[in-house]
Amino acid sequence: LEAGSPTESLTEVPATAETLGESIWTRRIIREDDPNSASMETRYSNSYRMAGATIALVARVVLRSPPTHFQYDEHFTATHNGTVACERHWTKQVPRDLV
């Protein structure tokens, strides 16, 4: 198991044969001797199984705070029956003015 705080839920709707799933995992790290080592990683996923199709949405976000700027990195993937339908990646840096 990975260190972090996982949360998972699964909801079944027998009348419509639908299944809805959700999972959240978060890890926060900071070394006592280095305040600039602070980071947070979160993974979030939703899945929907209905009418013979499975749709999954997965996002992963990593935030870091090195000495000169804040870093933001996000990756998003959407799949349909296991095949990637959409995938995006964003990376941003924000100066740490007076912080």
Image (tube, rainbow, N blue to C red):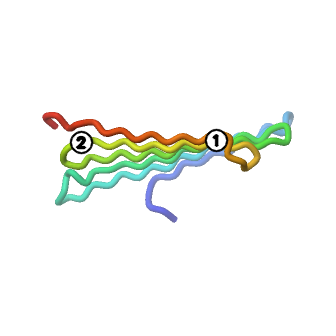
Q: Quadrant of the C terminus?
A: top left
Q: Residue at x 63, y 45 (%)?
A: 9
Residue 2 seen: yes
Secondary structure of the residue carrying tag 2 is: strand
Q: Amino acid under label 2?
A: His
Q: Amino acid under label 1?
A: Ala
Q: Residue at x 76, y 46 (%)?
A: 81
Q: Residue at x 37, y 48 (%)?
A: 40
Question: Quadrant of residue 3 in the image?
Answer: bottom left
| Tag 2 residue | 69
- Is residue 92 found left or right of 47 in the rendered image? left
Residue closest to the far left: 98
- Is residue 43 found left or right of 57 in the rendered image? left
| Above/below status of 16 relative to 56 | above
Q: Nearer the viewer, residue 85 or 59?
A: 85
Cα separation, mark 1 vs mark 2, equals: 30 Å
Label 2 Cα neighbours within 10 Å, binned few <14 / some 14-19 / many ≥20: some
Label 1 Cα neighbours within 10 Å, binned few <14 / some 14-19 / many ≥20: some
Residue 11 seen: no
Q: Residue at x 22, y 37 (%)?
A: 95
Q: Position of residue 44 (x, y in %)?
A: 54, 44
Number of residue marks: 2
Question: Quadrant of residue 68 in the image?
Answer: top left
Q: Position of residue 8 (x, y in %)?
A: 59, 48
Q: Are marks 1 and 2 in contact (CB under 8 Å)?
A: no
Residue 91: assigned label: none
| Tag 1 residue | 78
- Is residue 76 found left or right of 46 in the rendered image? left
Q: Earlier in the sequence, mark 1 or mark 2?
A: 2
Secondary structure of the residue carrying tag 1 is: strand
Q: Position of residue 62 (x, y in %)?
A: 40, 47
- Is residue 50 found left or right of 96 in the rendered image? right
